[in-house]
Amino acid sequence: MRDAYIVGAGQSSYGAFPDESYRSLFATAYEEALGSAGGVEPADIDEAVVGSLGVGGRQLGLSGPAVTEHIGLHGIPCSRIENACAASGYAVRQAVQAVKSGMADVALAGGYEVMTDMSGDVAKYWLGVSGETEWERLTGTTFSGVYAQMASAYIDAYDASPDHFSKVAVKNHANGAKNPNAHLGFECSLDDARDAPIVADPLNLYHCCPTSDGAAAVIVASEDVASACEEAVRVAGVGAASERVGLFQRDSYTSIASSAQAAETAYEMAGLGPDDVDFAEVHDCFAIAELLAYEDLGFCERGGAPELIDAGATELDGDRPVNPSGGLKSKGHPIGATGAGQVVEAFKQLTGHADERQVSGAQVGLTHNVGGSGGAAVVHVLEGGVL
Amino acid sequence: MSRLGIAGIGAYVPRLYVPASAYRDAWGTGGAAGVERVAVADADEDVLTMATEASQRALDAADGDASDVEHLALATTTPPTDEEEHTVRLASLLGIDPAVPTRQFGGGTRAGAVALAATLDATGPALVAVADSPQGTPESDESAGAGAGAAALVLTEDGVVSVEGVGEYGEPFPGTRFRRRGSADTESIGITQYERDAYTSAVGGAVEALEDDVSATSTAGAAKRADAVALTAPDGALPYRAARTLGVTTEKIAAGTVVSQTGDTGSAGPFLGLASALESGVSSVLLVGYGGGAGATAAFLSAESDVPVDAVLDGDTALSYAEALRRRGTITGEEPEGGGAYVSVPTWRQTIPQRHRLVAGRCVECGALSFPPEGACFDCGSLDGYENAVLPGSGTVEAATAIGQGGAPPEFVEQQQRSGSFPVAVVAFDGPGDDESVSAPAQVVHSPAGTPVIGDRVEAVPRRIYEQEGVVRYGFKVVPTEARR
C-alpha cells in the first residue's frame, strides 16, 4: 500500500462557546486545515470522515453530511464514525486507509462535539453513554467512576499515590497555558491539584478533564499530492484495537489492552519503537489514563509511570514530552474532536509551528486516542521532514 | 392432611433508625407513644427486598432451600406498586420454582396473620413472608411512628411450632386506619377512644373466637396460657390497651412486642414480636393481627422444642430526623430531566436470573465462568453456550471508588440525594467450585469506612437498583462481610 501524509491540520479553540454550533466549529477547523495545506483545493477532496459521539442529540443521524454540506463539500461521500472519545482518531485512520488503498487521493478527517450548552441534568445523561450500559452504568458509575476504579487497582498494585495524578495535572496545565486554543489554559500548582474536591475517590477535580466544545480537521493525502504541498507529515504507522467495553470483563484493570495492541501495530507498521518517539499526545481524560498510557505505549515498564512523572521525563523539556498541547486535561476534551485534535497538535509540532510549546527537534510524534474506558483505541505514529 | 407447623423463622429490620429524641428535637414535641426508635428503610430497600432478606434468613434457619418451597405467601399493605404480582418477583429473588402457587395478602395490617392462617393447609414446605414499610404525611401520628421490617416463616409438616387454632373477627369501624386509593400515606381520622374501641373489639373478638374454636382441641384459655402475646402495634401503647380485654398481663404483651425498637411495622409487627419471643425461648405465643376498619385474626402457637430463629431486629445506624426525611424521599427530587440510560424493560428482564440470583454461566467448551453468561466465552472465545452456574454471593473487592454528590448518572440521582455518596466496586464473586471466580460490578451498601479497600470480602444482598417508567428494577448490591448483620 502506498504512503499517506497529513498535509494540513487545524482546529477551533476548545472551550465553551454558546455562540457557536457544531457546524460553525467544524468550519473553523476546516478553514485552518485547508489554509495550512497550501496546494489542496476543496475540489480536490474526494471523501470525508467525521467523528462525533453526538452529545446532546442534535443531528444524531447523518451528522457527517450535515457538516460537509455546511463547509461546501456537498456531494462527496461522507460518513460519521462513532467510537466514543476515539471517534475522530478512528476517522483519521479511516481517511488514511482511503488514501493508502488508492480509493481517495485526498481525504478530510475530523470531528466535533458541543458539550457545554446543556443543562446539568441533560449532561449527566450523555456523560455516561459510552460506559458498559447494562451492568457497569447500572451500578451508578460514569467514566470518572470507572477510571477511579482503575486508579484504585493501580495504587493497590504499584508504588503510586494520588500525588502522581496531581503531577500529571500540573504538567499538562503548564503546557496548556502555552496553547492559545486550550479550554483551561492556565497553570496550576501541585497544591491546587492536590486539594481539589473529590469527584470519584481517589480522583479529584484536577484529575479529570473538562467537557468542551470544539472541532478539529486534518487533510490526508497521497504522496503525489503531498509532494506539491507546503508541509507534509508522513503517517508512518497506524494501529487500532478494541477491548471489552465493561471494565469488569477485562483481564487487567491496570492497563488498557486496546492501547497496548494499537501501539504495537502502529510501531510495527512504522518500523519504529517507543524509543524513537520524540513526543506524544496521549488520551489523559483522567490523570490515571496518562500514567497507564506511558506503560501501554512502552515508554516505561509496568508500574514505572509514577517514576517517569516524578522525574519530569514527560515535561515539555523532558526526555520525551507528553501532551505538549496541554492534553485533554488543559487543552480540553470535545469528545468527537479529540483524536483528530491530537493529530493537529502533532502536525504543528512536526512542522515547527507549535510556538511557545514547540518540542525541540521533534521528528517522530505519536498520538493515542481512547474510546470510553478503553473499549476502542487508536494510535498514529507520525514522521516529519520526510518529503 | 395434617396442618403445617413452623420450622424456621427469619426477620429483617433495616439497620437505619431514628431515635425518638431526634423526632422530638425536630418537632419540639410528641413522637409515637411508647416508641423509642423507628426503623427506616434505605432508599434502595422496600417490602420486597426486606421480605427477601427475611425469607433467606428463615430458609437458613430451617436449613431449607428455596428450590424445595412448594407454596409462597406474601403479606404487605405497602407493596412497591398498588397493582402487580409481587409474589412472582419475590419467588424469583429467592429462587423458588415458577410453578409454585403464590398468594398475596393485603388490604389491612392483619394481612400477615391471614396469610399464616391461609397457608396452614397448603402443601409444604411453604414460605410466608410478611413485610411492611408504612408512611404518613410528615406531621401525622402515622409518620411519627412509621417503621419498617419483614419476617418470614418456613412451614413444614414436621415444623416444631404448631398452630393450634385460629380465630377471626370483624366489625365495621370505618376511618380507624386506611390508605386512600393512589396514596402512599396511611391515615386515620384520629378519634382516640374510637380507635381504641376498634382495636380492643376486633382483637378481643378474634381471641374469643379462637378460644371458642371447637375444631381446635387446645385453644381454650389460650390468652392466659400463652407465654407471650404478639399483637399488631400501630404504636407502643395500643397493644397494652388489649391487656384487660384479653385478661393477660402487660409483661406477656411486652414479651411479644418489638414496636418500641422498630416503630409501626404494619402487618409484620406481630411476626417480628413472634420471632423475638421465640428467640428468647418461650414455648407458646398468642399472635393477633389487627387491621383498621376493623378486623383481627388470632392464632395460638405452641412450640414442642426450640425453633430456629435467624432474626435481625436491631438497627445499628442512627439518623437525624432530617436524614430520615432524605432517606425516605420525603424532601428529595426525582430522576432529573434528560432521562437515564435506557435499558428497556424486556432487555432488563432477560438478565433477571443474573440480577436476582447471580446465575453465571459455565462455558460448555472450556469450563470457565462468565458473567453475564452471554456471547463469546471470555476465556476461550467459544460460542457454544453456557451451563448455569449459580454463584454463592460472596466475593472479594478488586477495584473500588465512591461516587460523590453530583457524579451519579441520572437514574441514580434520586438515590444519591436520599442516601448520599455511594461506593461502587468491581467484585470477584466466588464461583461454585474452589479457586474460581467471576467479576461483576456492584454498588456497596453500608460501607462504614467509606470506599472499600481492595481485598475486602463482601456478600450480595437484594436491593432496588433503580426505577424507570414506574418499574422498579431489583438486583444485587454487596455489603462488606464484616458489616453484615
Image (cartoon, rainbow, N blue to C red):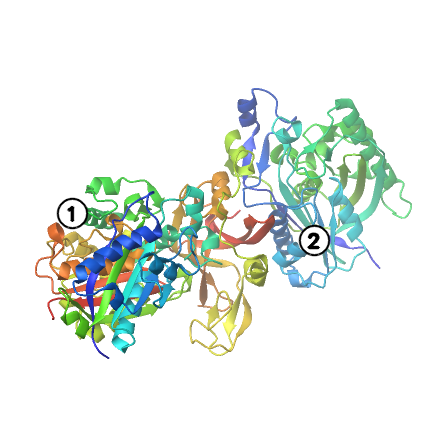
Q: How many residues crowd around disc 2 within 10 Å: few (fewer than 14), some, or many (20 or more)?
A: few
State the image quarter where residue B139 is shown.
top right
Residue tagged 2 = B85
* Labelled disc at residue B93: none
Tell me residue B330's x, y (percent): 56, 34
Closer-to-camera residue (A371/B392): A371
Q: Identify the chain of the residue marked 1, using the numbered disc in the image.
A: A
Between marks 2 and 1, how big is the CA–CA gap?
Answer: 64 Å
Secondary element type, mark 1? loop
Secondary element type, mark 2? loop
Residue A145 located left or right of residue A26 = right
Closer-to-camera residue (A164/B119): A164
Q: Identify the chain of the residue marked 2, using the numbered disc in the image.
A: B
> Relative to A285, does residue B247 appear above or below in the rendering?
above
* Labelled disc at residue A178: 1
The residue type indicated by label 2 comes to Glu
Asked if marks 2 and 1 touch (Cβ < 8 Å), the reply is: no
Residue B465 located left or right of residue A160 = right
